[in-house]
Amino acid sequence: MLGDEQVKVSNAHALPIDQIVAAGVQRQPDIRAIATRHGHQVEVMLWNYHDEDVEVPATPIDLAVTGLTDSARVALLEHFRVDRHHSNAFTAWKEMGSPQSPSAQQYDQLQRAAQLQLLTSPAHIPLEHGSAHLQFVLPRQGLSLVRLTW
């Protein structure tokens, strides 16, 4: 679902790669993003990684998307999520007892659970001077795909 033209991402919360290689992601989470553009559409994929896969409070995200068409006043926002509770066949598999040979019905459930899910309903949001500003939380080991179309 990412576009074909990668665009610049500035991110103060990404850990230095040499630190990750040397010590892993032990203290603070590594919040990273990649962004692409295609015509009048921008996609931003963000993820929250930590070596310890435990439940902790979600990380607040403050996302500014700039460089959109100055004349556009509104954009359609679609926010997709992969985490413990969204788009996750592994969670569904564990909840059904971790069957080694799922039944046909269980297999269908797993396929449905693996489909990329919207976190919220699509909504129109205001653009100001070619920019959008979004705030949301991203759980540990979670991934958000935000798509703006104007």
Image (cartoon, rainbow, N blue to C red):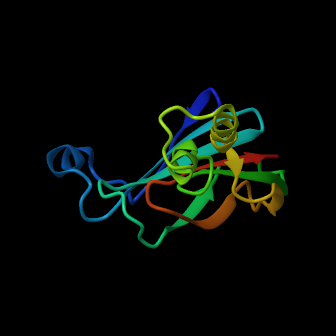
Closest to the observer, 118 or 130: 118
Residue 76, position as x, y percentages in the image: 81, 52
Closest to the observer, 111 or 32: 111
On the picture, is 52 further left or further right than 111?
left
- Residue 68 visible to an observer of this rendering: no
On the picture, is 16 further left or further right than 30?
left
Single out the residue that lies furthest toward the left: 22
In the displayed structure, 108 sits above or below 30; it is above
- Residue 119 visible to an observer of this rendering: yes
Q: Residue at x 66, y 63 (%)?
A: 133
Residue 69, position as x, y percentages in the image: 76, 46
Q: Quadrant of residue 105?
A: top right
Closest to the observer, 99 or 110: 99
Q: Quadrant of residue 120?
A: bottom right
Residue 93, position as x, y percentages in the image: 54, 45
Q: Residue at x 64, y 34 (%)?
A: 107
Q: Residue at x 60, y 59 (%)?
A: 64
Residue 77, position as x, y percentages in the image: 76, 53
